[in-house]
Amino acid sequence: MDKYLIKKSLNNNVLIAANEDGNEVVLIGRGIGFGKKTGDSIVREQVEKLFVLKDPVEQKQYKELMYNLDDTTLKVIISAVEIIRKRVSAPLNEHIHVALTDHLAFAVSRMKKGIGIRNPFLLETKGLYPDEYKIATEVTEMINKSLPVTLPEGEIGFIALHIHSALLNKNVEELALHSNLIVRLVKIIEEQLEVNIDKSSIDYMRLIRHLRYTIERVIRGEEVAEPEKITQLLKTEYPVCYNLSWKLIKVMQQTLKQHVYQAEAVYLTLHLQRIQTKMK
């Protein structure tokens, strides 16, 4: 039977303890901290949820967050992370416990004061990360039912970014940078082709997903094969879209500060041509 040695009781429902290997763990369960003190032990059967924070900095930050949250809000946020853990098919970076707890605590506090924050990347996030967005929708609905707040739709997008961040081991700021870059690229496309792209259309979703995968390939330094015959054809038949694709690539290079392979211009031109044809 697994036993844990209690190191600290954060509140009636949350304990910091050490497992049999000496690793620090967070134990969660209704009333498990009541009457407990440092040095006491607790068995696994008394624990509803358990997770390990291996990084000392993560441990410190999480404890500080917990101290400043009421039991009800803390319980709901822990449930939110648990929903995410159950819905995804890959391991989550442990940082989600700190990052998402911090974000949700701040979001709930803001909404109680009637202060909302607009999400400028909501449509892009929904199109880029549909699976994460679906999970984030479930999490937001659960929070709104459990707490006296109504988180707006924009929060779904922010939560989806945190989920994607934990799956890919990337920080949210980097993902937000990529979303901002995609928004800029789309704006350039609309200005240069003199079109207004329907943001709910399948063509828009295809375009932003292509831009996302292009950005990810650039960051990985991954080269795609260049179909030379198609390259020559596109230069001749679709010069406007081909030249625009190179303008977009230069913006990517300047923003990401990494080389973009020439073949990306070919595949991007095809997307641009499809949009231009449909917008005529």
Image (cartoon, helix red, strand yellow):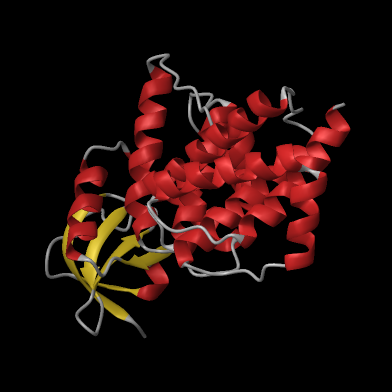
In terms of image quadrants, where is residue 176? top left
In the rendered image of this protein, does residue 21 appear above or below residue 110? below
Rendered position, 104 above or below 190 = below
Picture coordinates of residue 113, whole percent (x, y): 37, 15
Q: Whole-percent x and y of residue 219?
A: 45, 60
Seen at 59% across and 59% down, the residue is 262
Q: Position of residue 178 (x, y in %)?
A: 48, 45
Q: Is residue 126 left or right of residue 54?
A: right
**Residue closer to the observer: 130 or 262:** 262
Residue 96 shown left or right of residue 12 in the figure: right
Instruction: Say whether residue 95 is visible.
Output: yes
Instruction: Give the total number of marks visible in the rendering.
Output: 0
Residue 43 pos. (x, y %): 33, 75
* Direction top: furthest residue: 114
Specify whether 276 is left or right of 257. Answer: right
Residue reaching furthest left?
38
Residue drawn where x is 82% and y is 42% of the image = 274
Quarter of the image with the N terminus is bottom left
Q: Quadrant of residue 225?
A: bottom right
Q: Would residue 202 be seen by someone viewing this image from the given angle?
A: no
* Residue at the (76%, 32%) spot, across then down: 200
The residue under the point 50% across, 39% down is 181
Q: Nearer the viewer, residue 199 or 279?
A: 279
* 210, 60: nearer the viewer: 210
Q: Quick one: 263 or 178, which is closer to the camera?
A: 263
- Quadrant of image for the C terminus: top right
